[in-house]
Image: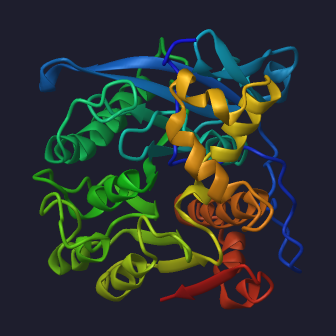
Amino acid sequence: MTSAFRLFLLASISSPLTACTAATAAVDAPDALGPRAVGYSSFTAVDAARADRSLLVDVWYPVDDEDAAGAPPAEYLLLDPFGLPSAVALEGPPVSTRPAQPLLVFSHGYGGISIQSFGLMEALASHGFIVVSPEHTGNAQSSPTDSFDEAAANRVPDVSFLIDTMFSRNRDPQDEFHQRIDESAVGVVGHSFGGMTAVGMAAGWAGAPPDPRVTAIAPISAVIDGELQSDDRPSPNAGFTEEQLESITAAVMLMGGTEDTNVPIGNNAIAFEQMVNASPLYKVDIIGANHNHFAAICAIAGWLLDRGWGPDIWPSLGAEALIEPYETTCGPDVLAIEEANRLQNLYVVSFFKSQLREERGYDQFLSPEVAETEPGVAFTAK
């Protein structure tokens, strides 16, 4: 076998979801798949303004029922030529004809890949969002060439460029996304280094200014204060200043795990106190989750094990880095990955439904009352 295994440690797992059981107003349950079928495709975007910088981009999007019939399941390439078949997404059907669908950009973790949070992306698309996820060239698993500062400096411009790209497609009568996107409803979600990217879209980061088109961000397990990460910070860009955090006026939801030793949950506590102008501002602590509970570790490991490839041969597949997080995240003595996934979807879907679609029925899930019915969550809002 080659080392072409598309390993990613900073993602969301795709798994069956269970509906929230709280007595709530009549809206689609945010911790279950939504009413829309989900399509999946990919394309390459080239930024002429940045020396023809090329980005591989994956897209998840809503699909009308009549176009979903007969479409084959999507496959996410992991070990060329093998792919993990999706239980949700379909390969390449037409984009839903519904106009004005909100746009989300997902940013992967340091050295990750564009499909790393496919479970969360599928859930969001099933609830009516168009989601694009770039593979950040130079700071991806396939191209780990950039320094920390180079990678940070590219992140915000990459996301802004993709917003430009999708808006151009929205305005092009020949494009499948023509008049499908609500250009006034743009959000960014990311995990770890991608969570820092989300913060950077609202605060500016590594020399790039904030993008005012982004009105809602959901950073997950993001380094906010580098001093909590370690005493040997790789760069001043390994965190945000109080002034940067005070400048954020977008809606923000901070999420992390209480057992995360890679990015301590205290980062979110600091951000919650310093984002004094963010409105609204939520903090969601998933009790018992570590850094990799927000990753597809268990889905990837299960795919390997189902093929008869145990951990003893993972190094030969280029997946040696999967062993430790698999052992610490997928066993019986830690928070079940299905529950971590459910809670992530519950809050991320509700947040973006409320803020980008103005469906205020989802505000009920962003309340202390509903949080009290979820013993695995510590929730704060202001």
Instruction: Provide residue 315's location: percent of width, then percent of height.
Output: 54, 29
Instruction: Provide residue 324's location: percent of width, then percent of height.
Output: 56, 50
Q: Nearer the viewer, residue 153 or 123?
A: 153
- Left or right: where does residue 110 sit relative to residue 309? left
Q: Is residue 372 above or below residue 225?
A: below
Q: Identify the residue at image location x=42%, y=64%.
A: 262
The N terminus: image quadrant: top right
- Left or right: where does residue 311 sit relative to residue 351? right
- Left or right: where does residue 366 sit relative to residue 139? right
Q: Is residue 267 above or below residue 358?
A: below
Instruction: Provide residue 221's location: percent of width, then percent of height.
Output: 46, 64
Residue 334 is at least partly visible in this image? yes
Q: Identify the residue at image location x=39%, y=51%.
A: 194
Instruction: Provide residue 98's location: percent of width, then percent of height.
Output: 66, 35
Q: Identify the residue at image location x=25%, y=46%.
A: 156
Q: Nearer the viewer, residue 206 or 182?
A: 206
Residue 8 is at least partly visible in this image? no
